[in-house]
Image: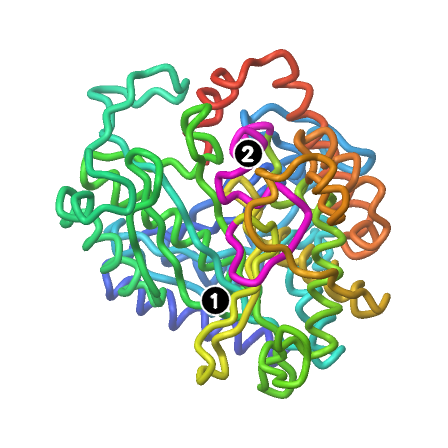
Amino acid sequence: MGSRAAQQRQEARQLAARLSAEGVRNVALTWVDNAGIARVKTVPAERLAAAAERGVGMSPVFDVFTSDDAITASDHLGGPDGDLRLFPDLDRVTTLAAQPGWAWAPADRYDQLGLPHAACQRQFARRMTERAATAGLELRMGFETEWVVTRAPAGHQTATGDEPLDYPCAGPAYGMTRVVELSDYLRDVTEALSVQGIDVLQLHPEYAPGQFEVTTAPGDPVRAADDVVLVRETIRAVSVRHGLRASFAPSFVAGQVGNGCHLHLGLYRDGTSLHRSPDAPWGLAPDAAAFLGGVLGALPALLAIGCPSPASYLRLQPSQWAGVYQCWGVENREAALRLITGAPDDPDGGHAEIKTFDAAANPYLAVGSVIAAGLHGIDSGDRLPEPQTGDPGVLGVRERARRGIVRLPATLTEAADRLEKSAPLHEAMGEVLHGAVLAVRRAEEAHFAESEDDEIAAATRWRW
């Protein structure tokens, strides 16, 4: 243990020296709370070795912060007492291309005795990844990130959401015009991500005014969650440098198409894709079918993880490609769970996509909970029902019932109720983390209980 600690100290000192030589003066250490907000402590670059050895102090109360910075409480967390230590992941230290003089690292949280904090979401994601590996499964995950960009208001940038919205592009949905109008900005986004080691697969205009989407390459689940945090903050930083402001909020304007953050996942065993079994239905090996069956069955509870804000449910509307019905389909963008077949000659092309999730979600909670649901599906021998074609939203109530298609929770209250009753997710998360998540969801419900849709959208527009 002593030699390992000494080796880590030496690694941190060498890293700090390299950062200083590159002109880095500060390192941002981030974690994401249960409301999906990236919280931060920063240290001077020369203090990185001390942070890696002893951690940086932070109150555990942030596990029960809500999106508007109010504080609630669970049975285990809340109040002014206690302290945690943030330990930067030295393997993920990244010099930030759009913030000169700054670097970034995700942090794991431990108590003062050096034990993992029971509500650390990043370590939860790691535990679930290791649980899958114990079962002989490798998961590769990646996110699609959607955001809306507007011109920043002159003077003080308010966060109330009541200022007029000034879009910097007027081109049509998915139109090349938007790329032309914002070509310098989009070039700088992709360049900054590339310099930081993020592999961009594609970037394109989306449906809503001022909306874009970037898709990044898959990786192991913890890395995928780290990457999406870095992607969001990089887009935010590039936007500021261009006099713009980026929003990842689920509902930017009530009644319009919102921002999703779709989660893609592929299953492998011994390096071989389980989505490429030629003799199996839909090409899915038995474990892949059971895993996806478990995810599909758990989706009502998973919505409280992947759609954690009342604003999320403004986005989840039928016939808007958000996946509001509990069904799956092959290349069906209206199904909550979409099977993507990929090119027949591409051994890595097949995977699945969860379309319901948005960027208010803590990505570590999202990947960990999906893995937990899928592994439970394998343990329980779950099966996928028949795939659905077309838009369930245009079917009558009786026809949906005949096909076994049900609406996913339409409110955060309903989704939180399902999470509270989910024994597999409770077991996977543990009492402390599960209780903290539910406490935050209940507080968000109560805060917006009397709010109109446009008030919810305005209040949360700049929180993510």
Residue 384 visible in image: yes
Name the front one of labels 1 and 2.
Answer: 2
Residue 403 location, x and y as percent? 73, 49
**Magenta stretch contains residue 238:** no
- Alpha-carbon span between mark 1 and mark 2: 41 Å
Residue 413 location, x and y as percent? 72, 29
| Position of 376 relative to 455 (above/below) | below
| Position of 49 relative to 279 (above/below) | above
In the image, 235: left or right of 176?
right
Q: Which amino acid does label 2 sit on?
A: Gln
Residue 39 visible in image: no
Residue 385: which quarter of the image? Answer: bottom right
Q: Residue at label 1?
A: 90
Q: Which residue lies furthest to the top in this view?
A: 450
Q: Residue at label 2?
A: 317
Closest to the observer, 258 or 450:
258
Q: Which mark is residue 316?
A: none
Q: In which quarter of the image is the N terminus?
A: bottom right
| Position of 192 relative to 301 (above/below) | below
Residue 101 location, x and y as percent? 26, 52
Q: What residue type is labelled 1?
A: Leu
Assign a secondary structure to mark 1: helix
Question: What crowding class fits label 1: few (fewer than 14 Cα within 10 Å), some (14-19), or many (20 or more)?
Answer: some
Residue 416: which quarter of the image? Answer: top right
Which residues make up the magenta segment? 310-333
In the image, 173: left or right of 223?
left
Residue 139: which quarter of the image? Answer: bottom right
Q: Which residue corresponds to the image point at 40% horizontal and 62% vertical from the top-left?
A: 216
Q: Are marks 1 and 2 in contact (CB under 8 Å)?
A: no
Q: Which residue corresponds to the image point at 55% horizontal and 34% vertical from the top-left?
A: 317
**Magenta stretch contains residue 320:** yes
